[in-house]
Image: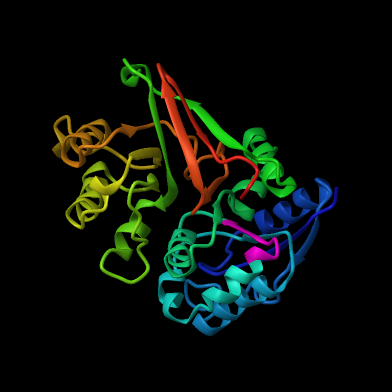
Amino acid sequence: MTHSIYIYSPSSAVRDRAAFRRGIARLRALGHEVEVDEAALSTHMRFAGDDDTRLAAIHRAAASGADVALISRGGYGLSRLLPAIRYKSVARAIERGTRFVGLSDFTAFQNALLAETGATSWSGPALGEDFGVEGTPDDIMEACFEDLVEGQGEGAGWQLPRTEALDRPFHAKGLLWGGNLAMLASLAGTPWLPKVRGGILFLEDVGEHPYRIERMLTTLLHAGVLARQKAIVFGQFTQYKAVPNDKGFKLATVVDWVRRQAGVPVFTGLPFGHVPTKVCLPVGAKVEMAAEGRDALIVWGHNH
């Protein structure tokens, strides 16, 4: 079945235009109708157009009537727009069936939308990074996106690391939320960090050394966010380099520290982040999470 996808650029400028073109060709090859926003390739300094240009693009995406509004890329820029976004218009578009999909800088938009309206958006692929890769896009990413487009996605499962195999089963229900850690930490103290209690918080990041990851988590910890959740789920934290001064300090050190400090279950290995293999996750949806042994599952059913 043919679905419509609207491509727009709310954050950084598209520098890799070849990847942009490949991504569009790939989506069309999958049978989708693709509409490209008039400002998708605009540039202003590091941004995809000035603030007004990118704000207008978001509102055009909301008015497009497309099945999916997909970002061209992440980067930086949405934080500047948060006070001016017409969240109710976006929420109405979602009610009419448009799914807003993206990751990275898009986390700011998603969590602000959740805080303002309670509407559900999707953490998932971006056009260039995922569909525009040279060669063949990741098959799991593509299958999860197709399930989302078809309205058939019901959940995401993965295996925990051997060192985290559970002695007893875990089960919880709560609101799924989160995304890029740097973006979430940047929302602390603003009106756009959702006040979620009893939620399932998932996190990922790229190019951040473990000590910086810990520092951002400390912000959320001291703000009371982490201890209010039923579970914290780490996705993929990639593209950083250890340095001699670490002396054994690593990402696992940070995870263990969070477990002790937050006092809630912490899981790792979620296939989501700045990696080829990524699932699609409904930010703002009520979900169930279950884990037993090394098997973990987040389920949201047919309703989102």
State whether residue 188 is above or below residue 216: below
Left or right, 100 with respect to 135, comes to left
Q: Is residue 68 magenta?
A: no
Residue pictured at 55% horizontal, 73% vertical: 48
Residue pictured at 22% horizontal, 39% vertical: 258
Q: Position of residue 154 (x, y in %)?
A: 62, 38
Residue pictured at 17% horizontal, 54% vertical: 222
Q: How many marks?
A: 0
Residue segment shown in magenta: 94-101
Residue pictured at 65% horizontal, 64% vertical: 95
Left or right, 275 with respect to 199, comes to right
State whether residue 145 is above or below residue 293: below
State whether residue 23 is above or below residue 141: below
Left or right, 167 with respect to 75, comes to left
Q: Position of residue 213 (x, y in %)?
A: 27, 47
Left or right, 80 with respect to 163, comes to right
List the single residue furthest toward the bottom.
Answer: 52
Q: Is residue 98 magenta?
A: yes
State whether residue 237 is above or below residue 54: above
